[in-house]
């Protein structure tokens, strides 16, 4: 556990997680940055690339897996894989696909291979959300807590869905279009739309089931009466 935390922090330091917002606003495309790293060993270019995508990538993987520890491990694996490909001169841009699509596909495939097809492996990657949240070092504490609680709730609710539905919703929440999801999941368009529809219906029921008891509890506490329907 401690090794996993140390490895993730080391990766963040190596990729320059503290890079300034001005640097991230550079006009170079993601593909150009990675090619600069691959061709010229430009580590600053890779830091910029990492800074652009690291948060959205981990959030996507957290929603996909339902566990922060798994998201961190998969993210770390993918960034290290990109470093390995770049240093070996083996990364190639995919025609018609953005770097972001390439990265998220890499993460999705890693999750499926390492966790969905081998659940024993995921059992050994148990890191509590509280421990993972200790890695946050910037921002207002109240905002960080609120965001962490919201992300944890979304991940927990998505964990109640069948894996095919969770896959579609996670990609959709990461701003992938239906057409892109069709290509990434290799599923017919109607199937993707059906999975999305059933997933959101299920999520709506889960949210209502959680929220109704809370409102009843608040009403009983304030009014001292039962909220049973007449």
Image (cartoon, rainbow, N blue to C red):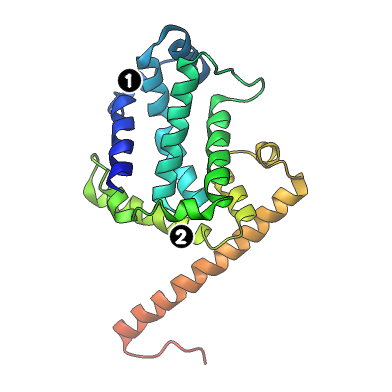
Q: Is residue 32 shown to the viewer in this render?
A: yes
Mark number, residue 30: none
Asked whether 78 or 153 is in front, the reply is 78
Quarter assignment of residue 18: top left
Quarter assignment of residue 226: bottom left
> Image point 42% across, 23% down: which residue?
49
Image spot of residue 176 (x, y percent): 59, 38
Mark number, residue 22: 1
> Image point 43% across, 7% down: which residue?
40
Q: Is residue 175 shown to the viewer in this render?
A: no
Q: Give neighbour class at mark 2: few <14, some 14-19, many 20+ (Cα, 10 Å).
A: some
Q: Secondary structure at mark 2?
A: helix
Q: Which residue is mark 2?
A: 156
Q: Is residue 173 left or right of residue 222?
A: right
Along the polypeptide, which appears first: circle 2 or circle 1? 1
Mark whose residue sits in front, 2 or 1:
2
Image spot of residue 39 (x, y percent): 47, 8
Asked whether 35 or 10 is in front, the reply is 10
Report the Cα–Cα distance between label 2 and label 1: 35 Å
Position of 83 relative to 101 (above/below): above
Position of 230 relative to 169 (above/below): below
Position of 45 relative to 127 (above/below): above
> Image point 23% across, 45% down: which residue?
140
Q: Give neighbour class at mark 1: few <14, some 14-19, many 20+ (Cα, 10 Å).
A: few
> Image point 66% across, 38% down: which residue?
184
Asked whether 39 or 173 is in front, the reply is 39
């Amino acid at each position: 556990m401690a090794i996993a935390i140390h490895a993730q922090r080391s990766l963040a330091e190596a990729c320059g997680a503290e890079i300034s917002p001005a640097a991230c606003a550079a006009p170079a495309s993601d593909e150009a940055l990675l090619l600069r790293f691959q061709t010229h060993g430009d580590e600053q270019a890779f830091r910029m690339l990492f800074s652009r995508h690291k948060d959205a990538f981990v959030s996507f993987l957290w929603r996909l897996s339902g566990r922060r520890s798994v998201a961190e491990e998969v993210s770390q694996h993918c960034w290290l894989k990109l470093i390995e490909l770049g240093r070996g001169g083996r990364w190639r841009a995919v025609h018609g696909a953005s770097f972001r699509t390439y990265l998220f596909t890499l993460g999705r495939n890693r999750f499926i291979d390492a966790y969905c097809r081998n659940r024993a492996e995921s059992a050994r990657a148990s890191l509590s959300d509280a421990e993972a949240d200790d890695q946050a070092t910037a921002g207002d504490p109240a905002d960080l807590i609120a965001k962490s609680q919201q992300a944890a709730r979304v991940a927990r609710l998505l964990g109640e869905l069948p894996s095919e539905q969770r896959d579609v919703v996670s990609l959709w929440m990461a701003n992938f279009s239906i057409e892109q999801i069709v290509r990434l999941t290799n599923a017919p368009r109607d199937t993707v739309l059906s999975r999305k529809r059933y997933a959101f219906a299920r999520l709506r029921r889960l949210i209502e089931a959680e929220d109704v008891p809370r409102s009843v509890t608040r009403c009983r506490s304030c009014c001292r009466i039962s909220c049973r329907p007449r």
